[in-house]
């Protein structure tokens, strides 16, 4: 007997007490919890995102499309970045003012090559206000998962309010599980030594988040 | 087929091991500091969600439903993962799982792997099994690295090196790092930031050259075949995305039916474990990507692990232990864990969850496993904090009965009739554990609380060997005070009664 058959057989014997007409999944799980915690006003949701990002030690910046190239250039320069990884589909205008050498995200580049690059600039798929989370799904302007991991500095541009949702349930609704997903909430961190928090272990030690007003929503409030 | 892995079969019974821990002042101080810090922050992070009770109930129901139809969901996982380009393997026990993983690593031609912290691979002793095959497994979680370099054992699910202080960690790094790879920098201090930097440099070398990664998973989504790994440091992302081959060893109880179910656990797990609104990194992947996307490993293997889980499933009272999402909240509120430390539990699963999981996964034949159900004062704090509402005291009492009175149980898929432990070494060990837990002043105080809880567990005398104890001393009269009130009184506002922080308020970000 294969282990597959053995395990499935054991499971079925173990569940002999479960009736055939057991409550189906749809009725077995009460979804009485909230879809979001708080109101739906777009401006306030973006303000909450900014506050929560800052709370977990991301640096939050706000700009509009006209100011973006200058801001990105300044953020890269502030980290002394000579080189920056650029994912496919990133708006070339975003890096128009940057002095750092652009290195495309290519399938054949090795982790060692990536390790020599200072920064990475990406967009995101969705941002979750309540938890201060950015989710990347490998779509245009986001690149392979490793490019936001190996370089030590990540600049992530979020279109607000279009890409912002309030809550985790709302974020999952927007995402496609078939894509490789990375949820990022602040820079990498550890508290493994006497519970002292240390930021920056293996992931990027610096996370700059740019909230880009895309013109559809209300005017941005100042960052917290 | 070989027998279920017994972990540390020669491990002393709980009270013997606990006595050593209780006498170790450093260990006790570290544990106390850690558990109290995390506990208070967790309470704040949980209080921030007004619908916590509803999320907890939904989590319980999702897991219960999945367990009740586990055969169907296992097959669904297999189909979905296979359709997405992954390969599924089934391992009935630890030996088989280790053999599968070793075989997969050997097939790549590699002799080293990088590992993400995973309880399942610790449970099966994978690192040791790989070493016997000439394959080196590098732990990459900072705490696991400290444990591995120090030839030590983890003592907490979430912070496995909680029993080590910074000076000890610096000494371990100085003396051991060079033997495993890049040595610690000269003049390494005991500042946590310096120690973390030393670990970053030491491990980066391994990540960049790694061709094979090994992980566990927090969740597997049946409808999509998606695996989820929740972490803080980024070592998980390194192991999951840089290697060409990824092997994930996952207990069969980690399944959730739908993508949507993650909306419950991605809210309850981070808040309950590290007291964060969200942990720094969560990775989700479904099989492999196509050649054009080329994002992450080209080869993905999922090893579905039984190793005693189906035996646990066969027990209608005990099966709820399989709902556990390994948040470790129950450890941090347990008065017995706080004094005894993680090592006394003789298993990779310490604390209250270990006390009900290990004796079910491994059976109650050994002294340590027979004594574990007694390593508790039945105060119920673990149940109160559990994000999937596992009634740990109920299972403890159930297992005590099994140890003391024998009865039917399932071992390796077959029904066996256990003999009562009376008169045997295990019963003596169990008795000592009962006495140990019940004679600690604080443990006793909490033990008195048990019958005050309005649930079906209302013993007049303690079952099993505890009966001898309660026969000679009347159980104190049951105060009507609910557990929560008691908790507030004993532990103050830092317990569950913490004020809810406003937006942007300070939650437990220091416990990542
Ligand atoms: S038993 Fe509950 S509280 Fe304990 S680790 Fe598991 S899920 Fe967390």
Image (spheres, coloured by chain):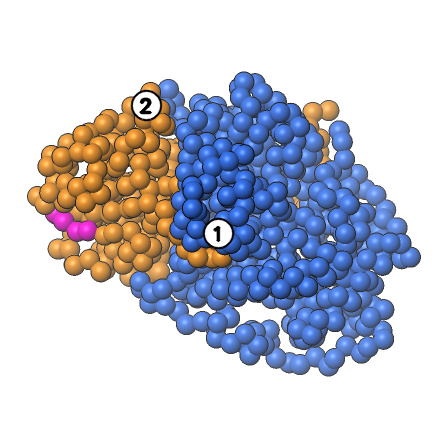
Q: How many numbered callouts?
A: 2
**Residue located at (61% from left, 57% from top):** B390
Q: Is residue B259 visible?
A: no
**Residue located at (80% from left, 51% from top):** B367
Q: Dot 2 corresponds to which residue?
A: A109
Question: Is B359 positioned to the left or the right of A89 in the image?
Answer: right
Question: Is A205 positioned to the left or the right of B435 in the image?
Answer: left
* Residue closest to the eye, B383 or A119: A119
Q: Secondary structure at mark 1?
A: loop
Callout 2 crowding tier (Cα within 10 Å): few <14, some 14–19, many ≥20: few
**Residue A143 versus residue B277 in the image, above or below:** above
Name the colour assigned to chain B in the rendering. blue
Q: In the image, which lettered chain appears orange? A: A
Sooner in the amino-acid sequence: mark 1 or mark 2: 2
**Residue located at (74% from left, 69% from top):** B438
Mark 2 residue's CB less than 8 Å from ligand 1: no
Question: Is B192 positioned to the left or the right of B421 in the image?
Answer: left
Determine if the magenta segment contains residue A62. yes
**Residue B380 versus residue B254 in the image, above or below:** below
Q: Quadrant of residue B386?
A: bottom right
Q: Secondary structure at mark 2?
A: loop
What chain is tagged by disc 1? A
Q: Main secondary structure of the magenta part?
A: strand
Residues in magenta, as a range: A61-65
Q: Nearer the viewer, mark 1 or mark 2?
A: 1
Gap between marks 1 and 2 measured at Cα: 33 Å
User: Looking at the picture, how far across and down is residue B423, in whole percent?
Assistant: 91, 57
Q: Dot 1 corresponds to which residue?
A: A192
């Amino acid at each position: 007997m294969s282990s597959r058959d053995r395990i499935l057989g054991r499971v079925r014997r173990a569940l002999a007490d479960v009736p055939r007409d057991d409550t189906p999944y749809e009725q077995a799980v009460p979804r009485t919890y909230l879809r979001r915690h708080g109101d739906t006003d777009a401006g306030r949701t973006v303000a909450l995102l900014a506050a929560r990002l800052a709370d977990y030690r991301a640096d939050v910046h706000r700009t509009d499309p006209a100011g973006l190239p200058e801001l990105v250039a300044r953020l890269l320069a502030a980290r002394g970045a000579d080189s920056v990884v650029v994912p496919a589909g990133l708006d070339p205008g975003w890096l128009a003012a940057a002095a750092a050498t652009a290195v495309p995200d290519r399938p054949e580049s090795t982790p060692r090559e990536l390790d020599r690059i200072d920064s990475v600039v990406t967009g995101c798929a969705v941002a979750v206000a309540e938890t201060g989370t950015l989710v990347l799904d490998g779509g245009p302007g986001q690149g392979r998962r490793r490019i936001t991991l190996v370089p030590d500095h990540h600049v992530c541009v979020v279109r607000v309010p279009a890409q912002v949702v309030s809550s985790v349930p709302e974020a999952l609704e927007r995402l496609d599980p078939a894509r490789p997903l990375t949820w990022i909430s602040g820079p990498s961190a550890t508290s493994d030594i006497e519970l002292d928090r240390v930021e920056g272990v293996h992931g990027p030690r610096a996370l700059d988040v740019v909230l880009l007003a895309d013109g559809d929503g209300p005017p941005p409030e100042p960052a917290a | 087929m070989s027998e279920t892995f017994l972990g540390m079969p020669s491990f002393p019974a709980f009270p013997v091991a606990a006595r050593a821990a209780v006498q170790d002042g450093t260990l006790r101080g570290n544990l106390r500091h850690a558990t109290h810090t995390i506990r208070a922050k967790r309470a704040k992070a949980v209080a921030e969600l007004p619908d916590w009770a509803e999320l907890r109930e939904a989590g319980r129901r999702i897991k219960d439903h999945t367990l009740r139809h586990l055969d169907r969901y296992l097959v669904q996982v297999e189909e979905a993962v296979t359709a997405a380009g992954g390969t599924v393997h089934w391992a009935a026990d630890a030996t088989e799982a280790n053999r599968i993983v070793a075989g997969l690593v050997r097939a790549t031609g590699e002799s080293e792997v990088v590992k993400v912290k995973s309880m399942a691979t610790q449970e099966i002793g994978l690192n040791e099994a790989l070493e016997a095959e000439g394959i080196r497994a590098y732990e990459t979680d900072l705490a696991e690295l400290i444990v591995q370099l120090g030839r030590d054992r983890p003592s907490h699910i979430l912070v496995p090196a909680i029993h080590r202080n910074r000076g000890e960690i610096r000494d371990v790094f100085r003396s051991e790092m060079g033997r495993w790879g890049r040595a610690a920098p000269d003049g390494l201090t005991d500042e946590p930031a310096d120690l973390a930097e030393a670990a970053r440099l030491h491990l980066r070398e391994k990540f960049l050259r790694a061709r094979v990664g090994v992980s566990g998973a927090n969740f597997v989504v049946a409808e999509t075949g998606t695996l989820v790994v929740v972490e803080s440091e980024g070592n998980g992302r390194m192991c999951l995305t840089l290697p060409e081959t990824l092997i994930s060893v996952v207990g069969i109880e980690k399944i959730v039916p739908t993508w949507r179910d993650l909306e419950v656990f991605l809210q309850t797990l981070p808040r309950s474990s590290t007291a964060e609104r969200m942990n720094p990194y969560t990775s989700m992947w479904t099989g492999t990507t196509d050649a054009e996307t080329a994002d992450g490993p080209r080869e993905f293997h999922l090893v579905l692990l039984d190793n005693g889980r189906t035996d646990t499933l066969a027990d209608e009272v005990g099966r709820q232990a399989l709902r556990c999402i390994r948040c470790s909240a129950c450890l941090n509120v347990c008065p017995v864990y706080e004094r005894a430390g993680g090592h006394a539990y003789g298993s990779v699963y310490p604390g209250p969850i270990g006390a009900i999981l290990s004796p079910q996964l491994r059976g109650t034949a050994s002294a340590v496993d027979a004594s574990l159900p007694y390593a508790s004062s039945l105060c119920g704090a673990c149940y109160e904090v559990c994000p999937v509402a596992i009634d740990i005291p109920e299972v403890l009492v159930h297992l005590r009965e099994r140890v003391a009175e024998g009865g039917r149980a399932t071992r390796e898929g077959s029904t066996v009739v256990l003999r009562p432990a009376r008169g045997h070494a295990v019963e003596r060990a169990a008795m000592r554990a009962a006495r140990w837990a019940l004679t600690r002043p604080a443990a006793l105080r909490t033990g008195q609380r048990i019958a005050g809880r309005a649930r079906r567990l209302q013993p007049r005398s303690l079952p099993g060997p505890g009966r001898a104890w309660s026969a000679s001393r009347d159980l104190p009269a049951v105060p009507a005070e609910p557990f929560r009130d008691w908790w507030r009184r004993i532990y103050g506002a830092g317990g569950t009664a913490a004020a809810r922080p406003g937006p942007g308020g300070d939650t437990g970000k220091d416990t990542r």
